[in-house]
Amino acid sequence: MATYRSKDKKLYDNKTDDHDKAGTNSLGATFIYKRIQDFESYYDIIVAEYTGRPDTAEDYYENVRKLLLYYNARLLYENERKGIFPYFTQKHSDYLLADQPDIINDIIGKSTVQRRKGIHMNVQIKDYGEGLIKEWLNEEYAPGKKNLTKILSEPLLEELIQYNDKGNFDRVIALIMVMIYRQQLHNLHVKKKNEDVRKNNLFNKPLFSREWWGSSDDALGEIAKNSVDINWN
């Protein structure tokens, strides 16, 4: 959660068209997805959606920016779309855009794409995201109750049912963004937890004791053998 000011809400976005291609039917699709919060009973759920195609791309960007501010969230977006980054920068709001997730190196393997914000989309990343969606939909948050029952967006459900690799499914691509960033944040949490455990194990041990050097008498004997006595007389 290092890139978030809020610990329970975040925004994911797929803007598949910058209004620069005449005749396209693409929509901007944005989901707000709430993660785990200890003191609340509902989590891991899409709590808001903004999907549409206003007259200008700037109108879309501004509506998304307002959502980010309202929910105290960060935005993961397809960084092939060039318009959103300069718009947010102009509004002094580029801090609302999520950094490029390092999980893409695990997906692709030593990716050569280095962009400061957002994520690019290719076949490997798309396939990985589709797998994450399938896993999430079938996860049970209670006995006999799968996550798919948490989806309240009928258009998203319709797209998931009809989804294929040839159609235009803007909401599903946005959901892919959700799942990839959800996994990225999980990995960061696990990494931080492991680092904290390692630090605690390090500093809780008494220095220069048998516990510090280990229980091996051979190791202590080797240290004593190689030590030099100094006579100050």
Image: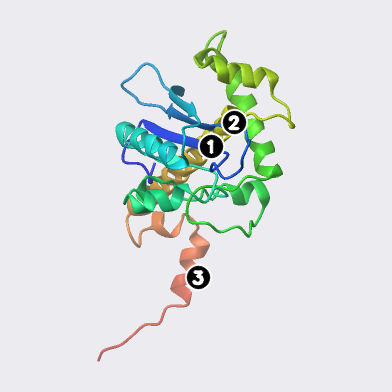
Q: Nearer the viewer, mark 2 or mark 3?
A: 2
* CA distance for labels 3 and 1: 61 Å
Q: Which of marks 3 and 1 is nearer the N terminus?
A: 1
Query: Residue 233, located in which quarter of the rendered image?
Result: bottom left
Q: Which of marks 2 and 3 is nearer the N terminus?
A: 2
Position above or below: 118 against 144: below
Element type where label 1 sits in the image: strand
Element type where label 2 sits in the image: helix
Left or right: where 137 falls relative to 167: left
Residue at 44% in and 36% down: 60
Q: Residues within 10 Å of mark 3 (few under 14, many from 20)?
A: few
Position above or below: 206 against 98: below
Q: Position of residue 152 (x, y in %)?
A: 49, 14
Residue, disc 1:
14
Q: How crowded is mark 1: few (under 14 residues within 10 Å), some or many (20 or more)?
A: many
Please name whichever residue, 94 or 198, is drawn nearer the observer in this view of the structure.
94
- Using the image, tell me which numbered label, if any, was put on residue 149: none
* CA distance for labels 1 and 2: 7 Å
Q: What residue type is labelled 2?
A: Asp
Residue 201 seen in the current view? no
Residue, disc 3:
222
Residue, disc 2:
170
Q: Where is residue 223 in the image (x, y as percent from the top left)?
A: 46, 71
Q: Which of marks 3 and 1 is in front?
A: 1
Position above or below: 147 against 16: above
Please name whichever residue, 209 or 113, is drawn nearer the observer in this view of the structure.
113
Please name whichever residue, 131 or 86, is drawn nearer the observer in this view of the structure.
86
Please name whichever residue, 200 or 179, is drawn nearer the observer in this view of the structure.
179
Residue at 32% in and 49% down: 91
The quarter of the image holding the N terminus is top left
Element type where label 3 sits in the image: helix
